[in-house]
Each structure stands twice: as C-alpha cells, then as structure tokens.
C-alpha cells in the first residue's frame, strides 16, 4: 500500500513528460540545449527512472525529502513548521464531527419518521450540498466582516479556529449523521434486538448495550474515510482562512511547480491517511470479536 | 392469443415522484437550471465576457445604485453577473455529466470484470482502487492539473478518470453477490455464454445502484470542478464558471456581497437538488444496495 | 425392471474447494465437499440423494452438470466423460441435462419476464425460429400448470410455488433427459409442496425423465425415488433401492437419520425408540480419519479410526460403507 | 388442569403503506399448566404474530393490536404498560427464536447475554449470575460450560447455539416457554436432539411450552394439544392423537393427506390454490376458496368454532367427517 502511494507521489514528476521542462516552464529563452542538459544533469533527471525513484525513496525513508526550490531549505523543515497546524485543525474537526454526528444520528434513527428525523435529514442534505469554500466565504462575510465576532484569518488563539473548523466539518458532520442513522436503523431491525427485548430489558439498556455498540462498528470505518476528506479539505479551508498548514503549503507548491515539495506533501498526507486506516482496522478488531478471533 | 400480449404494468415512477414533494420540487428546479444552461445564448442579452469598467460593481436590482440592464449586478470589471451565472451553469452541468459518464463507464466495466471473473485481475484493480482512495481526492487532482495545465477538457478528463473507484467497488460487490445467485447458475446450466450472462442477467440488476451513485457523483463532481476553479486550477481563464466567480468575488467580499453570494447560491441549489433527487432515487431503487 | 440402461455414471467424483488465506492467496487447506463417490443413474428412474446440510449433496449435483467442475473423477453421460470438457465444449451437452434449484426467489432473474426466462434456453441453443418461440413458451407453461396469460409478468408477482413451476418450465424448454432437482420443494409451504411434487412425478411419467432428486428429508426422498443414496460428510455411506433403505436401513447413520425424522403420527412417535446422535457434523475442512461417521457413531469400533470403510455390495443392489458389515459378503 | 395462559378474541393488523394486512383475526386459544401446545400453520397464518403480540414484541407501528385479552395467571398481558410487561418478559415467560445465528448479539459473549435477564429480574450479583448461567449451559448439554460461557456466538455451532438460546430463555425459570420454529433452521439429527432436550427440560422444570411450527411431524412428537392456524385464525384445536386420527377441518385433513405417505407411487392429495394474504376483513371462511367441500354460505359468513366434544374444536360449519 505505502509502496503504491510512493510510486504515485513520485510519478507526479513525470505526468507532463520531461520534469526539467516543467520546472523551467517550457523551453525558456536564453538557455541553450546545453544549459538545459546541464540543469537536467544537476537535478539528476537524466538517470533511469527506476534509479531516480529508488534514490528518492531511500532518502524519503530517512526523512529526507529533498530541498524545496522555492524555500531554498529542506522540505522536511518546511513541512515540520506547517504540519502541527494542519493536524490541530483536522483533529479538532474530526472530534467535533463525531461528537455532533453520533448523537444526532442515533436520535434520528430512534425517532424515525418524526420531526427530529426529518429535521436531521434537512440539515444533512444542506450540509452535504453547500460547498465548503462558499460556506467559508459566507462565514467570513457575515460573522467576521459584518459582525466582527472573530478574526477573518490567520492563527492565534481559539477564536481563530472557529470558522475554519466549521467550514471543514460541515460536510463530514452531515455525512456521518446519515451513516449513523442508517447503521442504527439496520441494527434495530436485527433479530438479536428482538431477543434482548424478549428478556424484558429496559429500552435504554437494549439501545445502549445491544444496538449502539453494533451500530458504531461500521462508523469506525468512517473515521478513516473522514480523515481523508478532512485532509483534502484543508487545502481549501487553509487557503481561504490563510491558515499556515500543510494544505495551503501544498497548494502553493503546486502553483509554484515546486515538484520536490509537492512530492513530499503528497507522500506525507497519503502516509498519514494509510496509518489512520491501519489504526481503524485495529480498532475494528477490538470492537468486533468476529474479526478479532478469526 | 391477444390476451397474452397484454403488457404488464411497469413500476409507476411518476406516482412515486408525485408522492415525494421534495423530490418533485428538486426535479422541477433542476429542469429549470438545465433549461437555462442549454438555451444560454438565447436567454442572455449581454456577453458574459464583455467588460465595461464604467458599470463596475453594480449591485443587483432592488438595491441602491443598481441598473435595470444588469438585473443581478456587475462584477469588478463590469461584466454582467446574470449572464455569467447562466453561462456558468453550462460549465458546471457539462463537467458534471460528461465526467460522470466517463467515470461511470470505466467504473462499471472494471467492476464487472473484477466481480465476475475475479482472479489476479481483480487483485490488481482493487489494489489500484485502494491506492487511489489513499490519496486525498482533491490533492491528487490538483497535482495532476498543475502539471497537465488547466482547461475545460483537462478538468473533465481528470474528474472522469479519477471517479471510477466508487462505481467499480459497488458494481463489484453487486456482481459478486449476483454471481452466486441461482438464476445466474441456471443461465450457465442452460448453456448461456459469459457475455450473455453479463448483458442479460447482471447489467439489468446493477443499473439501479449505478444510477444512484451517478446522481451523487454528479453533485460531487460539480463541487469538485468549482473547487478547482476556485483554487485557480480549473477551466481556463476566459470561461465564466461559478467557482471562478467566487474566487474573483472573494477579493471584494466586504464591498460587493453579491459576487460571492449569488454564484454560491446557484452552486448549492444545484447540488442540493441533485442530492434530494438522488436520495429519492436510492429509496425507490433499493435502500440497502447503495451507501454513500 | 424395464429401464436398465445407464444414462449417467459417476466414477470416483471428488470436489475440493481450496481455502485461500493471506496476502498472497496461499492455499492453506481444502474443504472436502465431495470425496470419492460413485453411482449410476438409470434411464427413466429417480435416484434420491439424501443427507444433512454440508454433506456435499448439492455440490454433487453441480459437479455433475459441470457448474462446479470436479476436482477429480469421471462423469460419464451416455459414455462420454463430461469432466474433461471445457466450458465451451460442455455447452452443447447442456441441452440434455437441467437443474431446478431450491430457492424459488433467487432462481429467477427479477428483471426478466416469465416469457423471457422460459424462452432463454431456446434462444441460446437456437432451437426454434423467433415466431414459434412464444407458442412454445405457452405450451411449456401449460405443461407445468401455469396460465399462459401470465407470461408477461415478472417473478415478484408470483408465489413461491408458482415460481418453482416457472423454473421447471425453463428446465423443460430444452427437452432434457436428466433433471437435477436440488431440494425443489423444501423452501415451499407445506400445502404447496405436494402440488409441486405431484407435478414432478407427472412430468417424469409423461416425458420419460431421469431425476437426481436431492433432499434432506428421507421420507420425502423415499416417496419420490426408485433408488436412494445416503451421503455423510462428502461420502456415500449407503446405497440401494428406496424400499430397502427405508424399510431396512443398515448403516448406523442411515438408521439414525431415519429415526431422527419425526412422523406425523403421534401414536407411533410417543412409543418408538429414537436414536439420538451425539454431537454435531464435523467440519469438512478437517474430516475425521478412517470412517467419517465414527465420531458420532453409536457402534464405533477401533478399526473405524484407522481404515476408511469401502462402499461394498452386500447383495441385491445394496451397498454399505461400514466395517460392521465387512464379513457379511461371504455369508 | 388449570389454564396458564388464555388468549381471547385477539386481533392484530399491520398497517402498510398500501394496505392493512389482517394478520390475526379473532384468535382464541389457551395453554394449560405443564403442557405442550403445538401451534401449526404455514407462513403468514398468524402463528408467530399471535405469540409475539402477547409478549409485546410486535413492532408498533406497523403492527396494531386491535383488540383481545391474554390472561396469564390472572393478569391481562395486553393491558399492561411496557414497563409492567417487562416483569413477565424473560422472567415468567421465556422465548426462543428460529434462527440461532442472528438471534444472538455477535459482539457480546454468550455468558454476558445470558446473565442479563438474571441481573435485571432477579437482582443477582455478577459472579453468582455467571455461575448460574454456566450451570444452565451445563443443563442443556453444552460440555465445558464454565469455559464456553466466555466465548462468542460465532464460536458455537448451530445446534450448540440453539441450546445456548434455550438456556438463556430458561435462566429465570419461566412458567411458560414460547418456541418459535426453533428447529426449522437445523438439521434433522440436531432437531431430534433439541426436541428431546426441550421435553426433558419441561419435565425437570415443570413449565408449559408453546411450540410454533409448520411441521406437523415435529408436533406429533412433542405436543399434547395442537392448534392449527390458517388465515390468521385457529381453525382446529384438539388433543394430539385425536387431531391426527380424526382431523375435522378440511384444511387439517388436506395438510395430513399432502404429506408423503409410506406407500410410494400413490399420488399425494395436494391442497389446490394458495394461502391467502388478507388485505381486507375476511368475509367468510378463509379456507373456502381452496376447500372442495365449500358451500355458498362458506363464502358469506364467518364460521363459528364448533365443539365436537372430547376437547376437540373445529371452525368448519359443515362438520365433515
């Protein structure tokens, strides 16, 4: 899996053909063939692709992702400055999303067909339909500019996080809520819920002990998916709110054709995602004895 | 003999639609949007790219300082917002539909192959799907577009090619369970070829879920296209798109609210209607077979 | 005995399913679903194949039709070995043999009309010109007791019994000689079972069909079959005519199976002594050594652990695989 | 013999989007102390719904108990609040279900699920509850009970799981055990084990059993009295010997005749037609359409239960013999 990720990340180099020309921006005037070849040699692009890949991979394993063209310092250092900001943003959003989505989803399932169910459906549909960048802009316009309640952008205290977190989580709250609801509804229709009721247990016990735990198992998988969406979402959110994190950095690297930095960012984000999915798989096996024991 | 030909009554979709008010409204709104997009040149009086610096930043009509020639106001270089919105609908819908058709075809084909035949092909393709899923979607597209350069068809192709995973996973799952069904075994027992089994027995049974995923994909693709345009990596500079209007309007967020509000409303409304319609479709098709 | 012609001979049939595990799909073991069985099917007769779930009876049926190609052994249809044919070479042979499945809901494609379902075999084998197909479908539906007006309907509009009739009509469309009936009535309501059973028996007489009748219910199989074979964990433990096996079961498993089956006769039920087997069916992944049945057999001996008893004749078309009857051949 | 449970005039409807299904129509039946009552019927005959509704296990909506009483030792179960009814569920009335695979919660250990009822109804401490659960598992014939109690449902085989299900239902020593097709999903040899086990436990624990099934043969083995249900009604009720030897109702006769007989080759007397799905209140006898003895009035008025003497009741006005 990780190997596949690194190949794709490395492959970014070659998507448009000759990376040398991409970096130099076509065939620049004032450079002779020889100049270009020299540059190519300097960058090591004249070696066989597989050698380049292995070389890059070898350094990457040791934490060396090369040097950024733009920042003129090591990519590792550039990223080290930005990564904590992104993790803070994504982590808070993930937790917030779960705290809000799980109770609402359960409520909607238990009160199926009532006002609460329909209310949550409307919220979910809107949450999934409003593009996050527009939501971000609207929040800035109304909450920050018009009423001046929170800062427009930048980092600092907790007040700087409020708008970015709302922007980042709106989609995942909506999706998780619907997922929890449908998972819960499915579990409530299972035979073992009937068995539990036939034992004369209190409704709250049936819900908590027999329904909720089973319903949340598939939701754990969601956390993995969510993390991917949240990391991707940081690109837009960080750009809008000028939040100095990985997302913004990546966008700038892409726009500046800073290929080594792009590679480093892509690899890092994908690796985080893969790691989170490994953790999710592990959590799955803890929660579900069928997986644990097979 | 004639009695035999009496056609069986098909599922009454229209009745179902009439019973679900939200879905009905969204279908009507979508119809209007499509109408505007298709007949854009006939419905607009102004060229969406005509700049007129004398009328820059006019607000929409009911507000002070507006000009009835520009119903929804003008932007920072005096272009007519209404016309740009209508032409923007064209881009959004076109990108949405074409990209979804491309990814749908790729995804369904791969899903059928992996699900029906299994084996090492299945392993390889599913591993590819895993790898693609391991990448934050938008990051991947950004990286690709940065290199191949912006442009309408590049955007469509990138969105189309990257969207196959959702289809192939669902189709593969459906096919794997269908393959074990006894009616497929019965078809093999009467000597039907693989080709016949796939066309006659498998495809009709996966159409439902595929249409549902497609409807959600359209909305997701429209958002993705707008996001790309917003980040400056989408459709080329000349064309009016909702995403780019938002990105341009962003600079005037404190002076000209309509430049960010109106394209956003169009975008959100379109996506909302498609999602409501997709939700309804999923309930009608089979609530259990598809998950978002 | 007018029918003595062998239609189908099954010789040392084996079907193992590999169990694959891990990243590289390494085969870590096998499910020994069918493990070396042999029997004959005589033209115009019914052979009942009885056993509990997981004994390999359905796999046997599918292996004969090459729906699940056998791991080893021969399936001779009128002398031709089907087991060596490729799927493509097998196709023309499919006209001669058909199958009816247990689950009337899963065995019909929900997206096709009854006409499309029943006509499919005719179209695939190009048996009739287009304009005659509809009449043929009507004829087939009539044969199984369905109104031909129903042919434009979809399966979900039918009850379980009617669906099973559609399945039968589809199987008959090719005029086969052999039909494998894989638990054709066990998913149906009690009052419908008899209807379908009567239909199958009537069709056999009218069309001179040969049946392989697979079921878990001994009295049912006794009722419809001329001959019977009892399976346990992938092997045949006893074989003979239905009459013999039902009236005088010899293998301890057959005896237990017959005894475990309740009869709708309370007077008999309250009095008779029942053999209750201990324990449950062992896993076919790791079957017991020697005799497969020894772990649950009330009469197990030391030899049963070591030597797998062969199916051997004890006279008069009767065969038993049990060490208890080892000496009886000579007597 | 005194009556442990008496159901009178029970009517249950299911309100679906398209129609109202008349699932149970005016059912009367009773269970005596320490006896086994067999309820026989095909799918859709209302046999499960009847017993589930007295335990409050019919989901409402779509289900709706229109009327009726169900007296269990002097208490009308149908008039109780859910809270009061809980004192009976799993405590004085135990229930086991058809599919032992899906009827256990897959993520909790067998023991954890068994002791729930004990803790809740009898206020027994955790340690003692586990001890009693292990004892119960032992009683239903599960070897190594004290170890296996910590295992999860998927580690048990089908037959073992049904045994554990029985142990769980009996843990509070109920006066009545309702068994809803408990052997339908099992093999014959395992079915025989379970049937003998229940008979043995009934003797030991002095309880009544209601055994719901579609299989006339199983009932012949274990029931003392049998109620035959069709179209949401009890159409015949008698002692087991009497019912099998002198069936009165044409449906019962038809069912018995449609079983494969000892004599091979004789054609089975099948009941023609299909069981009804009642989308409106039944006007006449629900079986009339399939009955070869039906007279015009059978389609018009609902027949009354006839007392044929000797504890034998039949819901057929023709009194066919």
Image: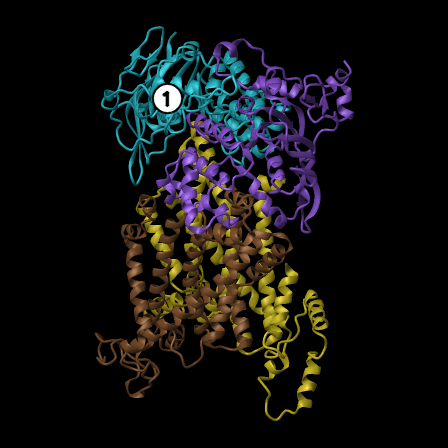
Chain colours: A yellow, B brown, C purple, D cyan
- Picture coordinates of residue B248, whole percent (x, y): 39, 77
Quick one: SS at disc 1? strand
Residue name at image x 62 percent, y 74 percent: A13
Left or right: D241, with B11 as reference point: right
- Picture coordinates of residue C228, whole percent (x, y): 61, 25
Q: Which residue of the protein is positioned furthest toward the bottom in this rendering?
A: A30
- Picture coordinates of residue A112, whole percent (x, y): 35, 43
In the displayed structure, would residue A21 be above or below residue A171?
below
Left or right: C37, with D101 as reference point: right
Whether residue D91 is visible:
no
* Chain for numbered disc 1: D
Picture quarter with the N terminus of chain B: top left
Q: Residues within 10 Å of mark 1 (few under 14, many from 20)?
A: many
Count of numbered tags: 1
Left or right: D4, with B197 as reference point: left
Question: B138 or B292: which is nearer to us?
Answer: B292
Question: A152 or B85: which is nearer to us?
Answer: B85
In the displayed structure, would residue C97 be above or below residue D249?
below
Picture quarter with the C terminus of chain B: bottom left
Res D268 quadrant in image = top left
Q: Which residue is mark 1?
A: D229
- Picture coordinates of residue D54, whole percent (x, y): 36, 24
Residue name at image x 78 percent, y 21 percent: C303
Residue name at image x 33 percent, y 6 percent: D309
In the displayed structure, would residue D121 be above or below residue C30?
above
Question: D16 or D215: which is nearer to us?
Answer: D215
In the displayed structure, would residue C181 be above or below residue D304?
below
């Amino acid at each position: 899996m990780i190997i596949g990720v690194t190949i794709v990340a490395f492959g970014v180099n070659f998507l448009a053909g000759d990376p040398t020309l991409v970096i130099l921006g076509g065939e620049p005037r004032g450079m002779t063939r020889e100049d270009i070849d020299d540059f190519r040699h300097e960058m090591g692009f004249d070696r066989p692709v597989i050698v380049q890949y292995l070389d890059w991979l070898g350094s990457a394993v040791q934490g060396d992702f090369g040097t950024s063209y733009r920042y003129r310092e090591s990519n590792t250092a550039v990223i080290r400055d930005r990564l904590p900001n992104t993790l803070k943003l994504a982590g808070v959003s993930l937790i917030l999303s779960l705290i809000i989505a799980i109770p609402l989803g359960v409520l909607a399932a238990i009160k199926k067909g009532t006002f609460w169910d329909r209310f949550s459906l409307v919220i979910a549909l809107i949450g999934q339909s409003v593009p996050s960048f527009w939501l971000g802009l609207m929040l800035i316009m109304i909450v920050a500019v018009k009423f001046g309640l929170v800062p427009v952008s930048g980092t600092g205290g907790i007040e700087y996080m409020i708008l970015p977190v709302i922007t980042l989580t709106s989609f995942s709250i909506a999706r998780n809520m619907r997922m929890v609801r449908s998972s819960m509804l499915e579990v409530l229709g299972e035979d073992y819920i009937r068995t539990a009721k036939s034992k004369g247990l209190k409704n709250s016990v049936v819900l908590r002990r027999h329904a909720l735990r089973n319903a949340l198992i598939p939701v754990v998988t969601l956390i993995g998916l969510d993390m991917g969406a949240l990391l991707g979402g940081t690109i837009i959110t960080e750009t809008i709110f000028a939040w100095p994190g990985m997302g913004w950095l990546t966008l700038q690297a892409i726009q500046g054709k800073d290929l080594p930095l792009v590679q480093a960012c892509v690899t890092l984000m994908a690796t985080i995602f893969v790691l989170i999915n490994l953790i999710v798989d592990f959590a799955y096996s803890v929660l579900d004895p069928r997986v644990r024991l097979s | 003999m004639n009695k035999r030909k009496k056609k069986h009554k098909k599922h009454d979709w229209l009745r179902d639609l009439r019973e679900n008010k939200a879905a009905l409204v969204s279908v009507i709104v979508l119809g209007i949007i499509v109408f505007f997009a298709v007949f854009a040149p006939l419905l607009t009086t102004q060229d969406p790219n005509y700049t007129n610096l004398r009328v820059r930043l006019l607000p929409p009509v009911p507000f002070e300082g507006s000009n009835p020639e520009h119903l929804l106001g003008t932007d920072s270089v005096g272009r007519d917002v209404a016309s740009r919105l209508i032409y923007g609908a064209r881009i959004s819908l076109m990108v949405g539909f074409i990209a979804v058709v491309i990814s749908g075809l790729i995804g369904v084909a791969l899903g059928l192959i992996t699900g029906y035949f299994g084996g090492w092909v299945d392993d390889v393709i599913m591993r590819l799907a895993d790898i693609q899923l391991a990448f934050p979607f938008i990051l991947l597209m950004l990286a690709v577009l940065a290199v191949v350069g912006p442009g309408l068809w590049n955007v469509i192709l990138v969105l189309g090619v990257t969207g196959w995973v959702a289809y192939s996973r669902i189709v593969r799952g459906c096919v794997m369970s269908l393959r074990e069904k006894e009616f497929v075994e019965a078809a093999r027992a009467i000597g039907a070829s693989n080709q016949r089994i796939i066309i006659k027995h498998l495809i009709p049974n996966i159409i439902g879920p595929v249409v549902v995923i497609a409807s959600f994909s359209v909305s997701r693709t429209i958002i993705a296209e707008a996001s790309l345009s917003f980040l400056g990596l989408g459709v080329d500079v000349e064309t009016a798109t909702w995403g780019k209007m938002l990105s341009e309007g962003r600079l005037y967020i404190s002076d000209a609210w309509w430049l960010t509000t109106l394209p956003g409303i169009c975008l959100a409304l379109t996506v909302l209607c498609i999602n409501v319609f997709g939700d309804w479709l999923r309930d009608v098709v089979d609530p259990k077979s598809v998950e978002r | 005995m007018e029918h003595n012609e062998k239609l189908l001979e099954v010789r040392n049939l084996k079907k193992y399913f590999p169990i694959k595990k891990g990243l590289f799909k390494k085969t870590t073991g096998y499910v020994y679903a069918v493990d070396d069985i042999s029997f004959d099917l005589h033209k115009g007769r019914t052979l009942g194949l009885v056993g509990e779930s997981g004994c390999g009876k359905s796999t046997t049926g599918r292996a004969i039709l090459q729906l699940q190609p056998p791991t080893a052994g021969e399936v001779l249809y009128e002398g031709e070995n089907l087991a060596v044919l490729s799927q493509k070479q097998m196709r023309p042979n499919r006209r001669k043999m058909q199958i009816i499945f247990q689950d009337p809901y899963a065995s019909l494609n929900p997206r096709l009309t009854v006409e499309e379902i029943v006509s499919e075999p005719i179209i695939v084998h190009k048996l009739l010109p287009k304009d005659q197909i509809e009449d043929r479908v009507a004829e087939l539906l009539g044969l199984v007791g369905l109104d031909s007006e129903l042919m434009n309907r979809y399966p979900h509009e039918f009850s379980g019994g009617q669906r099973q009739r559609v399945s039968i009509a589809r199987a008959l469309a090719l005029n086969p000689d052999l039909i494998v009936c894989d638990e054709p009535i066990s998913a149906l309501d009690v009052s419908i079972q008899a209807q379908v059973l009567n239909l199958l028996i009537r069709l056999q007489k009218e069309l001179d069909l040969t049946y392989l009748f697979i079921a878990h219910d001994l009295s049912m199989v006794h009722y419809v079959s001329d001959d019977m074979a009892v399976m346990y964990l992938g092997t045949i433990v006893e074989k003979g005519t239905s009459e013999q096996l039902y009236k005088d079961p010899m293998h301890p498993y057959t005896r237990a199976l017959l005894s475990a089956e309740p009869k709708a006769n309370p007077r008999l039920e309250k009095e008779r002594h029942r053999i209750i087997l201990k324990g449950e069916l062992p896993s076919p992944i790791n079957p017991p050594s020697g005799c497969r049945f020894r772990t649950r057999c009330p009469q197990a001996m030391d030899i049963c652990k070591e030597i797998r008893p062969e199916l051997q004749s004890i006279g008069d078309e009767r065969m038993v695989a049990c060490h208890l009857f080892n000496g009886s051949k000579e007597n | 013999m005194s009556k442990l449970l008496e159901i009178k005039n029970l009517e249950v409807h299911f309100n679906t989007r398209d129609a109202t299904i008349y699932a149970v129509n005016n059912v009367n039946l009773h269970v005596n102390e320490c006896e086994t009552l067999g309820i026989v019927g095909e799918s859709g005959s209302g046999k499960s719904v009847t017993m589930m509704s007295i335990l409050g296990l019919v989901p409402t909506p779509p289900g709706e108990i229109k009327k009726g009483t169900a007296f269990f030792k002097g208490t009308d179960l149908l008039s109780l609040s859910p809270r009061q009814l809980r004192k009976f569920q799993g405590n004085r009335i135990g229930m086991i279900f058809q599919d032992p695979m899906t009827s256990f919660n897959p993520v909790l250990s067998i023991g954890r699920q068994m002791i729930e009822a004990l803790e809740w109804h009898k206020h027994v401490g955790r340690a003692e509850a586990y001890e009693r659960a292990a004892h119960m598992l032992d009683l239903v014939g599960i070897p190594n009970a004290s170890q296996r109690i910590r295992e999860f449902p998927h580690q048990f085989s089908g037959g073992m799981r049904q045994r554990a299900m029985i142990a769980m239902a009996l843990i509070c020593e109920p006066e009545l055990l309702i068994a809803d097709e408990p052997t339908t999903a099992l093999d014959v040899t395992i079915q025989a084990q379970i049937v003998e086990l229940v008979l043995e436990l009934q003797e030991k624990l002095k309880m009544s059993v209601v055994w719901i099934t579609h299989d006339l043969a199983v009932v012949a083995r274990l029931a003392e009295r049998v109620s035959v249900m069709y179209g949401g009604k009890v159409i015949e009720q008698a002692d087991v010997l009497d019912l099998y030897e002198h069936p009165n109702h044409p449906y019962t006769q038809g069912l018995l005749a449609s079983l494969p007989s000892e004599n091979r080759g004789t054609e089975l007397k099948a009941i023609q037609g299909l069981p009804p799905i009642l989308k409106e209140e039944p006007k006449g006898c629900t079986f009339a359409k399939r009955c070869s003895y039906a007279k015009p009035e059978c389609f018009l008025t609902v027949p009354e239960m006839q007392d044929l003497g000797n504890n034998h009741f039949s819901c057929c006005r023709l009194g066919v013999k």
